[in-house]
């Protein structure tokens, strides 16, 4: 697995982002010790959801080579998918690319 990206400064400036980043680090450490622990995914979802809701301006542009972005872009009622799509792209900010694009 490649290294995690360094989260942009605005995330450390936001209390909620910073808390969730720390939660993810803790959860990741726990998941290496306990096979059934699934807190990491839950924390990732919470952070992506928070980014889409509160930092929409900072979310990266759609990927040009990504089946998921392709899918969202083709939906006739894009508004319906707007936040899901934003959450997908938000994952780039704090996860390695190959993990970020899984959801
Ligand atoms: Zn935030
Ligand atoms: Zn994508």
Image (spheres, rainbow, N blue to C red):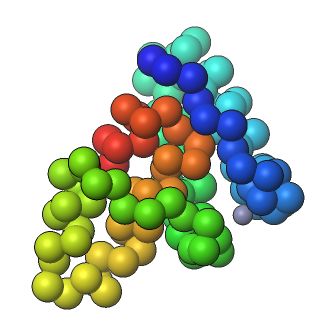
Position of the N terminus, as image quadrant, is top left
Q: In the image, what residue occupies the spot 59% across and 55% down? A: 47
Figure quadrant, ligand 1: bottom right
Question: In the rendered view, does 38 fall on the left or right side of 75?
Answer: right
| Front position in the image: 21 or 30 | 21
Above or below residue 10? Residue 99 is above
Q: Provide residue 102's location: percent of width, then percent of height.
A: 32, 41
Q: Provide residue 83's location: percent of width, then percent of height.
A: 41, 74
| Front position in the image: 79 or 61 | 61
In which image quadrant can residue 14 be found?
bottom right
Q: In the image, what residue occupies the spot 50% across and 60% down? A: 60
Q: Provide residue 90's location: percent of width, then percent of height.
A: 51, 57
Question: In the rendered view, does 102 fall on the left or right side of 77?
Answer: right
Q: Provide residue 51's location: percent of width, then percent of height.
A: 60, 64
Above or below residue 77? Residue 53 is above
Q: Is residue 46 visible?
A: yes
């Amino acid at each position: 697995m490649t290294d995690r990206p360094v989260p942009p400064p605005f995330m450390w400036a936001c209390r909620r982002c910073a808390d969730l980043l720390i939660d993810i680090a803790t959860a990741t450490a726990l998941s290496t010790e306990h096979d059934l622990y699934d807190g990491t995914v839950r924390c990732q979802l919470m952070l992506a959801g928070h980014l889409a809701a509160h930092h929409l301006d900072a979310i990266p542009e759609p990927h040009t080579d990504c089946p998921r972005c392709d899918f969202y872009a083709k939906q006739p009622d894009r508004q319906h998918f707007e936040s899901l799509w934003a959450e997908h792209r938000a994952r780039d900010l704090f996860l390695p690319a190959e993990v970020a694009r899984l959801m």
